[in-house]
Amino acid sequence: MTDLVTLTRTLAEPDRDLVVLAEGNTSMRTGDGEMLVKASGSKMATATEADFVAVRTQPLLDLVAAEESDDSLVNRVLLDARLDADTPKPSMEALLHALCLEEAGAEVVAHTHPTAVNGILCSDRAQELVAGALFPDQVVVMGRHTVLVPYADPGLALARAVRTELHRHIERHDRPPKVIYLVNHGIFVLAASTSEALAVTEMTVKAARILAGALAVGKPVYLTDAEAERIDTRPDELHRRRRLASREDR
């Protein structure tokens, strides 16, 4: 859990401009069908081990796949999914964390609201974020393909919207994304380790800043499919990606 707490507090450092107040949340797979997720209302900047809740993921996945949409039901499922009834209530976005961990195979998930990214997600140019890669390291760290999810009410409705787009992406590309963009909301980063979660978040912010600069002076010029594929499969870049995912320094 130490790594998760460290990641959470690092993401909340003021200079990073990723979250303020009680925004954002993180999670980590802890075993078969179980995860640790940030408690509702706790602050990432001051997070301690007491701010994380051990939760069974299957009840959350079952709720997302069901048809009921009652707020009281969501609250009850979140509380009942806790391994220890004396621990705090999990974040409402635990539903999305369960999806990313169990249905996309992530080990660590980081959800933030970066100002640089939201400046685009809250505009009519949000689609440009998933239109292609702008530079090689974007491909290495974030992967070739990311997901854009239209705005949905945070909680159950958003989890269901993410589930639809996540399944569509995996069917199309045969692997899960590393970044899910949520229109008018923020980002979910899916990673193999806490160090990769931080690196992908940082690169997502850099990519958004570069895109904003490109949009300010003209039209973005994306790498061609062949160029992006070359970066995505080069042995040296695959080596860098493996080291990043395994917590080694690049």
Image (cartoon, helix red, strand yellow):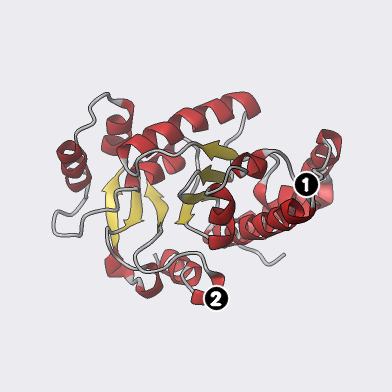
Tag of residue 220? 1
Q: Position of residue 39 (x, y in %)?
A: 28, 59
Q: Amino acid at mark 2?
A: Asp
Tag of residue 113? none
Towards the viewer: 231 or 58: 231
Q: What residue lies at 31% left-to-right and 37% top-to-bottom?
A: 156
Q: What residue lies at 52% left-to-right and 49% top-to-bottom?
A: 122
Towards the viewer: 139 or 152: 152
Q: What residue lies at 38% left-to-right and 61% top-to-bottom?
A: 23
> In the picture shown, does residue 51 fall above or below 83?
below
Which badge, 2 or 1, comes first in the chain's sequence? 2
Q: Quadrant of the N terminus?
A: bottom left
- Report which residue position mark 2 lands on: 15
> In the picture shown, does residue 42 fall above or below 168?
below
Q: Position of residue 172 (x, y in %)?
A: 62, 25
For numbered disc 1, what is the local secondary structure?
loop
